[in-house]
Image (spheres, rainbow, N blue to C red):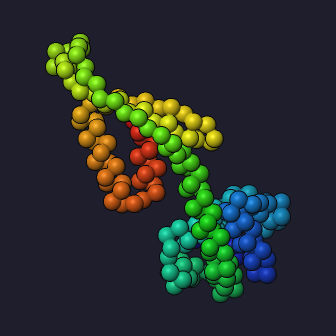
Amino acid sequence: MLQLLEKLPAGRAPEFLHKVVDGICGRAYPRYQDYGTIWSLSEWMEVLEETMAYFKTAVGKNISDEEAAQQISELNSDYQEAITKCLKGRKEEIRNALVESVNGISSAQLQDFDWQLKLALSSDKISMLQMPLLNLDLDVRENGEIKPISIEMNKEELQNLINALEAANKKESHWTWALLFYFVTTGI
């Protein structure tokens, strides 16, 4: 991992690493034109991807400094030091960028909801007669627009939704809520 980084002169490593972090944080990534004499295009793509993955994984998984250092132990000490300094100095900035990217995925927010309980009195199937149905109307704000979503559920589907909401609440996971909201609003 990151072996290709050693093709870069050690003195240029900090600049390259900080530009990669800039890219992760929403600013400009390093440009191939500036490094084309060092790496081929395929090597460039590989070193860029591996470097981004290293920083994102180290911060996203909140691994210890020792574990982060162990992942780059095969590199020359100059490169290890440059990577470690960059990671320590910009860890919080990388974390904020990762949180923002997650928030961007689940930018929809529930504004209001309404529900009605109805009784289906007729159906093409005799077994479906007099079945209670819940109509759930959600007003969801996404990108400044309010989008109405209507869902009709029988008793079993409602129980599944309640169980999923309770499980998400116990986990208190942003991802769990985001995925659950996605499935509810898309009707999957």
Splitting the image into 4 quarters, where does residue 46 fall?
bottom right
Residue 87 placement (x, y as % from top left): 63, 77
Direction from residue 27 to residue 177 in the image, left or right: left
x and y percentages locating residue 157 in the rendered image? 28, 36
Regarding residue 114, the answer to whether it shows in the image is: yes
The one of 178 and 162 positioned closer to us in this rendering: 162
- Farthest bottom residue? 77
Residue at x 56% of width, y 71% of height: 59
Q: Quadrant of the N terminus?
A: bottom right
* Residue 43 visible in image: no
79 left or right of 164? right
- Residue 18 lies, with reference to residue 116, above or below; the image says below
> Toward the viewer: 137 or 45?
137
**Residue at 55% across, 72% down:** 58
In percent of the image, x 54 and y 83: which residue is there? 65
**Residue in front for this viewpoint, 93 or 141:** 141
Residue at 63% of width from left, 80% of height from top?
88
Q: Count the marks.
A: 0
In the image, farthest residue toward the left: 127
| Residue 53 horizontal/vertical position (percent) | 59, 65
Task: Indicate whether 159 appears above or below 116.
Answer: below
Image coords of residue 47 (percent x, y) = 67, 65
Q: Quadrant of the C terminus?
A: top left
Identify whether 129 is placed above or below 17: above
